[in-house]
């Protein structure tokens, strides 16, 4: 039955919203009129004043008025209409149109006065605007707008003027929007009302300083940022409570297998590793499923923590699934776990999308019968054909590379009756604690904050690629002394084939220049046998130099390798560069990483390379990476639906997080009736996304 509140009515009841437009609006999550109020502007255009043409600057979006000096159609690489207009300031600007009708040229005749809005760009001879919005000024010309003009997130087929018109209709009913944030807390934190905030953001007057709005320091924005962060925190806390009410598998063991593993290792665990293992064991003894995030910098020993955790589950009679994002990392883990577990009498299986039919069939049978105690795999693990007999623990490495539905699918495989398996999530991407406590409020959180003894910091040098010959000489000298080196090839195109081709060309170049060295190649398109052969030759010391694509980013451990060259380093993200660098520095010798770049460097690339040169600290690098990329990319959530904030930003707004956590506690204890309305208002995703 339709609601009497217009804000709750379907958006297709509005005038002009037909089936096609309704489909476009649905893509943006706009289903009812109230959704429009929370579809917030990305930015604002200032059409409230006219700028003299002489005062405009490159990159500005401005409103100008001038008279047409000339207008013509020219033919270069493509047909275009070019007009020049000037004003009383004595300066001219070019208007350039690639899509136009002949009538437009007729209307823009010499002497015609026009008002234009667009982005100013530096052209070859003067400033120009490409496809500006324009209006011919007649005697009955309308006055300037009194408000800043909002620009909304949109989709193909949906114009800004349509979104502005629909938002104007929604705002007419804003008095019917309930204020669900507790009034006492709103006043305590000096927040304006919800209605006042929304009206200001959708229809900001020119008195609202555009600089304040662009910097998100406006009180209207702060009000909504605060409420959105609260809603996300509460949704994760609610799931945490839910997960502690469902049944888990209580796992206890005598640690017989664990102690046998420790005796077989040529080193002892760090204090940090031992502490985290104990925290995990305590979790697995609870009556609800464990959900713990373990983060540790490159080389801190997360894999051994995963092994200890797996042995606890196996000794209690359960199977373990270890899911990793790439085949080369899966192969590396399979090899490590086989070396550790087979002497203990435990079978380890490996599943990938490239296995032969007979081998895959045998593995699936062993998993279904419970003969395989630990199963390592990529996305292949959550295919329907994979059936576990008794799955008790999921270990997910570099979890941010998997979509939410993939992790949910794997969790469902371990459900036995009403019981769900435990989940251990590991990442080598250090996340500042305050951010982790908000982004993963549904999970417990451990940090391996200690590197194994004897590890030396890696000396990082940044060099232009014109120094290639010097670098080749350095490789030759080091390898002749018994060291080993990586040469990593990257390409800007998102193409594995092109990246492999580049690596093959580099191999030929290096073999020609370094005939005395043994050089091998490894890339993602090689067969598992070929990759294993190349890696084994390198690990055993038979190969001096390994040319590779970024497939070696994680998991490869060769202690004697002490030199890493990364070609075109400016094309990689900071986290990926830090991971690659972590492939060296695993032995006792001093290690070096050379970052080669192609000039000129962009400002962002310069900042990345400087950060890596100046620090080996994963947390500092993560902080800078967050600044550059934003939390959605670092947490790997752009494609999955998690952490999709409408106005808040975890990095920018992190100073608010202690208050957010404190206010969430007060709402849970004193205003529980506000929890669900706040979540419903701000969290667009399905409930399962929050539960991932």
Image (cartoon, helix red, strand yellow):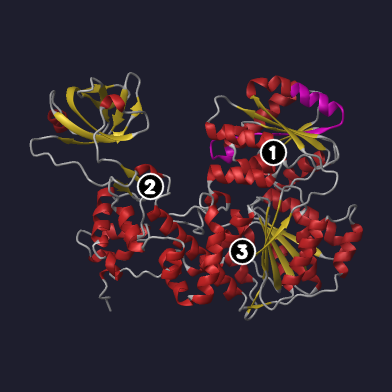
> What residue is at 29 percent from the left and 60 percent from the top?
22
Residue to which mark 1 is pinned: 615
Residue closest to the eye, 382 or 490: 490
- Give the image location of residue 576, x and y in percent: 63, 43
User: Could you say which disc has been placed on residue 382 in the image?
Assistant: 3
Which of label 3 and label 2 is nearer to you?
Answer: 2
Could you give the CA–CA distance between mark 3 and mark 2, rounded to whole angstroms?
A: 45 Å
> What residue is at 64 percent from the left and 43 percent from the top?
621
Local secondary structure at mark 3: helix
Which of label 3 and label 1 is nearer to you?
Answer: 1
Q: Quadrant of residue 673?
A: bottom left
Q: How many marks?
A: 3
Q: Tag 1 or tag 2, which sits nearer the N-term?
A: 2
Q: Are marks 3 and 1 in contact (CB under 8 Å)?
A: no
Near mark 3 (Cα within 10 A), the count class, few <14, some 14-19 or many ≥20, is some
Q: Which residues are magenta?
A: 472-497
Residue closest to the eye, 64 or 567: 64
Residue closest to the eye, 288 or 59: 59
Residue to which mark 2 is pinned: 213
In the rendered view, tell whether residue 227 sits above or below residue 221.
below
Q: Is residue 168 visible?
A: yes
Does 480 appear in magenta? Answer: yes
């Amino acid at each position: 039955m339709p609601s009497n509140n217009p804000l709750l009515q379907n958006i297709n009841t509005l005038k002009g919203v037909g089936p096609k437009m309704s489909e476009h609006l649905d893509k943006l999550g706009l289903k009812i009129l109230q959704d429009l109020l929370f579809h917030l502007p990305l930015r604002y255009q200032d059409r409230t004043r006219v700028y003299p043409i002489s005062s405009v600057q490159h990159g500005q979006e401005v409103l100008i008025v001038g008279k047409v000096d000339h207008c013509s159609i020219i033919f270069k690489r493509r047909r275009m209409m070019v007009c020049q207009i000037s004003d009383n300031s004595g300066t001219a600007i070019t208007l350039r149109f690639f899509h136009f009708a002949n009538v437009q040229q007729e209307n823009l005749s010499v002497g015609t006065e026009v008002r234009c809005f667009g982005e100013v760009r530096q052209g070859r001879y003067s400033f120009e605007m490409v496809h500006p919005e324009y209006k011919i000024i007649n005697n009955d010309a309308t006055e300037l707008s009194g408000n800043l003009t909002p620009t909304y997130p949109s989709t193909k087929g949906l114009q800004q003027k349509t979104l502005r018109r629909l938002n104007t209709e929604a705002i007419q009913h804003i008095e019917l929007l309930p204020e669900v944030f507790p009034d006492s807390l709103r006043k305590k934190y000096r927040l304006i009302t919800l209605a006042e905030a929304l009206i200001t953001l959708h229809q900001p007057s020119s008195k609202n300083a555009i600089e304040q709005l662009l910097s998100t320091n406006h009180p209207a924005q702060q009000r909504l940022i605060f409420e959105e962060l609260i809603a996300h925190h509460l949704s994760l806390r609610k799931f945490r409570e839910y997960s502690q009410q469902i049944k888990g598998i209580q796992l206890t063991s005598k640690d017989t297998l664990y102690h046998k593993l420790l005796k077989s290792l040529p080193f002892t665990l760090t204090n940090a590793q031992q502490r985290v293992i104990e925290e995990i064991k305590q979790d697995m003894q609870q009556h609800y499923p464990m959900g713990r995030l373990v983060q540790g910098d490159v080389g801190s020993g997360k894999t051994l923590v995963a092994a200890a955790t797996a042995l606890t589950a196996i000794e209690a009679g359960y199977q373990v699934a270890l899911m990793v994002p790439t085949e080369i990392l899966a192969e590396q883990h399979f090899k490590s776990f086989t070396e550790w577990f087979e002497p203990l009498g435990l079978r380890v299986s490996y599943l990938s999308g490239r296995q032969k039919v007979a081998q895959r069939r045998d593995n699936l049978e062993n998993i279904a019968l419970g003969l395989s105690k630990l199963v390592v795999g990529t996305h292949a693990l959550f295919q329907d054909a994979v059936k576990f007999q008794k799955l008790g623990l999921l270990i997910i490495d570099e979890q941010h590379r998997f979509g939410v539905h993939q992790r949910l699918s794997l969790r469902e495989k371990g459900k036995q009756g009403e019981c769900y398996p435990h989940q251990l999530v590991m990442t080598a991407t250090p996340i500042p604690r305050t951010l982790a406590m908000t982004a993963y409020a549904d999970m417990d959180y451990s940090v391996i904050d200690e590197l194994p003894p004897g590890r030396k910091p890696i000396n990082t040098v940044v060099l232009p690629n014109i120094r290639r010959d010097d670098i080749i000489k350095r490789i030759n000298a080091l390898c002749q002394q018994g060291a080993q080196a990586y040469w990593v090839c990257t390409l800007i195109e998102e193409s594995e084939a092109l990246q492999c081709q580049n690596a093959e060309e580099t191999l030929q170049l290096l073999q020609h220049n370094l005939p005395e060295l043994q050089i091998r190649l490894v890339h993602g398109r090689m067969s598992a046998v070929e990759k294993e052969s190349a890696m084994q030759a390198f690990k055993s010391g038979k190969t001096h130099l390994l040319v590779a694509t970024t497939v070696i980013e994680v998991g490869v451990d060769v202690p004697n390798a002490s030199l890493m060259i990364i070609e075109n380093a400016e094309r990689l993200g900071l986290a990926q560069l830090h991971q690659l660098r972590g492939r060296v520095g695993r032995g006792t010798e001093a290690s070096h990483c050379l970052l080669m770049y192609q000039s000129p460097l962009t400002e962002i690339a310069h900042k990345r390379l400087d950060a890596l040169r100046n620090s080996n600290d994963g947390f500092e690098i993560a902080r800078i990476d967050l600044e550059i990329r934003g939390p959605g990319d670092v947490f790997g959530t752009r494609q999955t639906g998690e952490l999709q904030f409408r106005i808040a930003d975890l990095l920018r707004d992190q100073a608010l997080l202690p208050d957010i956590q404190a206010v969430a506690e007060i709402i849970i204890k004193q205003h529980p009736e506000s929890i669900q309305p706040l979540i419903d208002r701000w969290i667009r995703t399905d409930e399962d996304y929050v539960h991932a």
